[in-house]
Image (spheres, grey):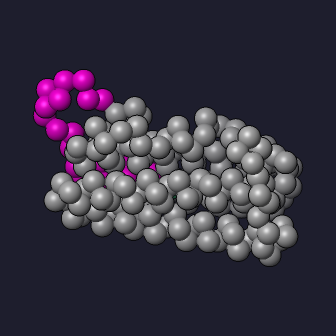
Amino acid sequence: MKPTENLGSFLAHAVVLEDEAAQRYDELAEAMRQHNNPEVTDLFERMAGYSRLHRAEATDLAERYAGGLPALKPWEFNWPGMESPESASMEGSHYLMTAHHALKLALGAERSAQAFYAGVAAAATTDRIRELATEFAEEEADHARQLIDWLERVPPPDPGWDEDLDPPVEVE
Ligand code: ZN
């Protein structure tokens, strides 16, 4: 059951992706709270909220149009355009020491989700999957744009503050 061919499978993938995103934003929000950065804490809490809304929407669509979410086994997932949601997950709190790094980590995850949805849209074999995947990809692109705006306001720390600290995702 490929997400490009089966609506239930597509929505099951979306639920996993959004669930991972919500958990990651919860952790990022907590890290920023500990670093006394209320603005970025608020941003991440809002983003976690978007992910939970999105997950609820995918669950609801599955109930209405696909007979409910299929119970896919871990190996039955198929992630074209990305390794897996875990690959974008937190690589360790080492990278969460600054708001800049937390924002970059979140941006990498949003781009990875966008690439997944865009990949499904491009290869979809039904109109409904194509339409939904396109819509979801646009929402992820909007999340990425919000993070890019924030990255412009939150510059990287001075060089050398931690010699080998480089986030696992690039902004470029
Ligand atoms: Zn998103």
Indicate left or right for 152 with 111 as reference. left
Q: Magenta segment range? A: 143-166
Q: Can residue 145 be seen in this view?
A: no
Rendered residue at 55%/59% (across/down): 19
Q: Can residue 123 be seen in this view?
A: yes
Rendered residue at 50%/55% (across/down): 21
Q: Does the magenta portion include 152? A: yes
Q: Nearer the viewer, residue 105 or 154?
A: 105
Rendered residue at 71%/57% (across/down): 12
Extreme top residue here? 164
Image x and y of residue 136, in percent? 62, 59
Q: Is residue 111 above or below residue 64?
A: above
Indicate left or right for 126 with 85 as reference. right
Q: Does the magenta portion include 157? A: yes
**Quadrant of the rendered image containing residue 146:** bottom left
Picture quarter with the C terminus: top left
